[in-house]
Amino acid sequence: MPRAKLAAIADRYFQSPMTLQNTSLRTEILSGLTVALALVPEAVAFAFVAGVHPLVGLYAAFIVGLITALIGGRPGMISGATGALAVVMVSLVAEHGVEYLFATVVLMGLIQIVVGALKWGKFIRLVPHPVMLGFVNGLAIVIFLAQMSQFQVPGSAEAAGHGLAGGEWLSGMALYSMLALVALTMGIIWLLPRLTTVIPAPLAAIGIVAAIVIGFGLDVPRVGDMASIQGGLPMFHLPMVPLTWETFEIILPYALILAAIGLIESLLTLNLVGEITGKRGGASQECVAQGVANTVTGFFGGMGGCAMIGQSMINVKSGGRTRVAGTVAALFLLAFILFASSLIEQIPLAALVGVMFMVVIGTFAWNSLMILRKVPLTDAFVTVLVTVVTVATDLATAVVVGVIVSALAYAWNNARRIHANTAVEGDAKLYEIQGPLFFGSSDGFAELFDVAGDPEQVIVDFAGSRVVDQSALQAIEAVAAKYEAEGKRIALRHLSRDCHALLSKAGHLMIDSDDDPDYVLAVDYSVRTGVLGSH
């Protein structure tokens, strides 16, 4: 293969250091190491939430992270086991066991591949900006709340059902030490970039705080207090479930929900990372990558996953902009499991909590608090609503609710825009329709006409309007029927070509008019009754 083609492939998929202009291999590797360190407690915690062994979460973080880093739609994004998926998995594992979870993850991945192949990922562009703001703010709060479990006595949260409820909180010197180390970590991350950028600030903070804790033998919670992360290579494993229709009925609902949540969170994270890195596109490719990653994960004993906004923010703000950082993060995570578990288990949780707190501060859209009073009331309401629903339920539900409310608000506002300017044109009365004609404005459209008082010839001009849907066609037909009942004729003018196509598709006869060369006129709208005439 020619060297030029090899270089192009490397640039596209790996953005190798030979072709990088604004970043370096060293920065990418160090950023990947930082992400890997932050992934460990997250993967273990989410495994506890789902009710599975910690290695199930770690294997998912490795496999999903590696595959999406290599073929995902946005270099710089980090994927792995997430809490949004874990909370759905817990009931499946409790009722049917972990083998059903593996089968569900495989089906989930196949569904995501189909979504990507059909290029449905592009519909993420329908998510309005207020929904994005609410998503970002809600996710920042969720990340913050997720760190609260680290302020509990190790093991108490797990014994209480993998949650905060019932866990025993740290107190006394243990609490003060934890808070002090968290504050020190945050201070280092804030101050270090002002002194040097040789090493990513989060990685330096983790190293310094870990050195202090280990050097002085401080008695504070560490990664190893959550669970041992030591293990071997993930092994190929067919899910041990009956290949029956009953099994399919059990796993399909979970697979659909997990696939939807995973794709929504991944695509919104893709947009967010794209805004930071200045990149666009890749939604369908990301869907396929997530699907491939989850399908493979299900066959290797992993719990599945999706994009992680917290780790993605750590990566891009540490300088990771290419596929190298995500790939390195996954490989480091595997190395931790195989060779360095005893060392990683000594890292204080306070250092990782401090890193995530800085992610929270950087993720939350603080400017949204200022603009809530300046934007339309509907947009402000949607932003707050999505934030609250994200915290109360899950990201997918919040985004769907936000999009529905935004769409209803948009439809209502446009429904009120329909009106008409009237004039006399020869012996005919002219109605110049303004505003879109669709299901929301069809009733208002019918009220614009004075059927009884109009002359025998009426012209409806749609130059300032658009006929959008079947409800609009029905509204036009209803108005025409009223004029017919009065023995009067109605003609349509200046329908745009897309409206012309819509009327033609509905089966109504359309004839071009010599006096309207730019637009096609709708005539003989009802062939049966001869209601509409040529104009």
Image: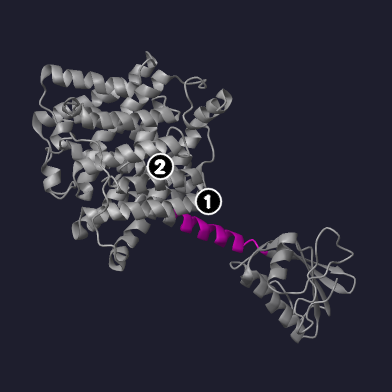
Which mark lies nearer to you, 2 or 1? 1
- The answer to which image quadrant residue 498 occupies is bottom right
Q: Position of residue 521 (x, y in %)?
A: 80, 67
- The answer to which image quadrant residue 439 occupies is bottom right
| Magenta highlight on residue 408 | yes
Q: Nearer the viewer, residue 150 or 430?
A: 150
Q: Position of residue 314 (x, y in %)?
A: 36, 30
Q: Is residue 268 above or below residue 14?
A: below
Q: Nearer the viewer, residue 530 or 113?
A: 113
Q: Secondary structure beneath disc 2?
A: helix
Horizontal side, residue 305 vs residue 509: left or right: left
What is the span of residues highlighted in magenta in the rendered image? 402-418
Q: Position of residue 4 (x, y in %)?
A: 58, 24
Q: Are marks 2 and 1 in contact (CB under 8 Å)?
A: no
Q: Amino acid at mark 2?
A: Val
Quadrant, the C terminus: bottom right
Confirm whether residue 507 shows in the render.
yes
Q: Within 10 angstroms of label 1, few (less than 14), some, or many (20 or more) residues?
A: some
Horizontal side, residue 234 vs residue 438: left or right: left
Q: Residue at x 34, y 18 (%)?
A: 191
Q: Sequence-wise, which precedes: disc 2 or disc 1?
A: 1
Magenta span dominant secondary structure: helix
Q: Secondary structure beneath disc 1?
A: loop
* Residue indicated by mark 1: 119
Q: Amino acid at mark 1?
A: Lys
Horizontal side, residue 355 vs residue 152: left or right: right
**Residue at far front of view:** 1
- The answer to which image quadrant residue 142 occupies is top left
Quadrant, the N terminus: top right
Q: Is residue 24 above or below residue 512?
A: above
| Magenta highlight on residue 144 | no
* Residue indicated by mark 2: 136
